[in-house]
Amino acid sequence: MSRDKESQRDLSKADLDDLQQRIDARREKYKPAAENAHTSAWSLGMRYGSEFFGGVLVGGGLGFGLDYIAGISPWGLIVGTMFGFAAGTLNVVRAAKEISSGSNGG
Amino acid sequence: MADTNPIKQFEIHELVPFEAFGLNLAFTNSSLFMFLTAAVTIVLFTLAMSSRALVPNRAQSVAEIIYGFVADMLRSTAGPDALRFFPFVFTLFIFILMANMLGMFPYFPGPGLHSFTITSHLIVTVALAMLVWLTVIVYGVFKNGPKFLKLFVPSGVPGYILPFVSLIEVISFISRPISHSVRLFANMLAGHILLKVFAGFIVMLGAGLGVGGYVLGIAPFAMTLGLTALEFLVAFLQAYVFAILTCIYLSDALHPGH
């Protein structure tokens, strides 16, 4: 962004590229080893926990609602909770994928 | 002995009682902190950007870095066409960040004398998460029409288990606002309770053992100091996580069944 503005001055493009390369190298060198190593265990657990909890809660809730409407208690709740477990597991697997791909610190 | 109840910080106090249609719509300390969050953000950004210099000073640099940070996050997770959601994501991010940071003040000259973290109340985070979730549904259906339902039909699944997989996908989709909101809420709640429990130990030791207790109190004080630093990190990290998950969900609305 600011590089475009800078290039209007007497710095040549090659100079700027060279500077950018050196800056990038420095950044790489001084990058914090693990930016959130300290919180990651805590918030990672919270992340997985809430993902799984959400799935089970919604599955069980939908099953319970079905029971209430269709009057087939307790089958809706039982089957719904099972599907909820499956959805929760799916959520956790997705969260793990996101985290291991590095797009999200948890 | 001073009040060492670690839950007291989450109390709601009515500042301006107001009732309409049988509902209690009082202006509470929670409302005040939401108002402060918005006001402080606006004032800080206005001050930071007021010079509009080509070569930014420190404050303007910070504002520009935050801007660039959110724009990059949105572009890298949801694609360049997601930038139309930039104001939404930026507002969410900055609102949660500022709310978390304001909650880090240990003292506030108001009723109860305690500061208030609005994101430590589930109702606030649920409202924010529902906003994202409904935006995804409304915009997804508006932009993709029936194709939005592709989100629930993963490709390459054999026909005979497709109904089950779709059902699981639907449940997973509905559970999003729950995990989205619970994570922010639980992190803020747990962190602040932990902080106040350790701070309470200092007072308890002092009240129980006198001067010797205050000497021993150095240990929990050191812990409180460390936890405060940690909480600042959590305050930022949770705002970041909330924003990046918003980006991921918005990317589903833009490109379902990718």
Image (tube, rainbow, N blue to C red):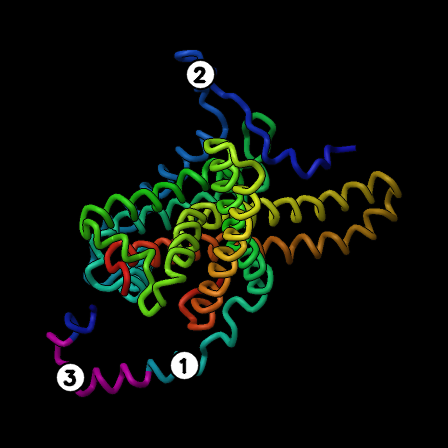
Mark 3: few, some, or many residues within 10 Å (few <14, many ≥20)? Answer: some
Tag nearer the camera, 3 or 1: 1
User: Within 10 angstroms of label 1, few (less than 14), some, or many (20 or more) residues?
Assistant: few
Whether residue B232 is visible here, answered yes or no, is no
- Residue appearing at x 87%, y 40% in the figure: B208
Which residue is denoted by mark 2 in the rendering? B23
| Depth order, front residue of B147/A73 | A73
Quarter-of-image position of residue B227: bottom right
**Is residue B57 shown left or right of residue B110?**
left
Kind of residue sitting beneath label 2: Leu
List the residue tagged with mark 3: A13
Residue type marked 3: Lys
Magenta includes B112?
A: no
The nearer-to-camera label among 2 and 3 is: 2
Please state the horizontal and vertical placement of residue B40, each as a whole percent of the image.
38, 40
Q: Which residue is denoted by mark 1 in the rendering?
A: A28
Q: Is residue B114 visible?
A: yes
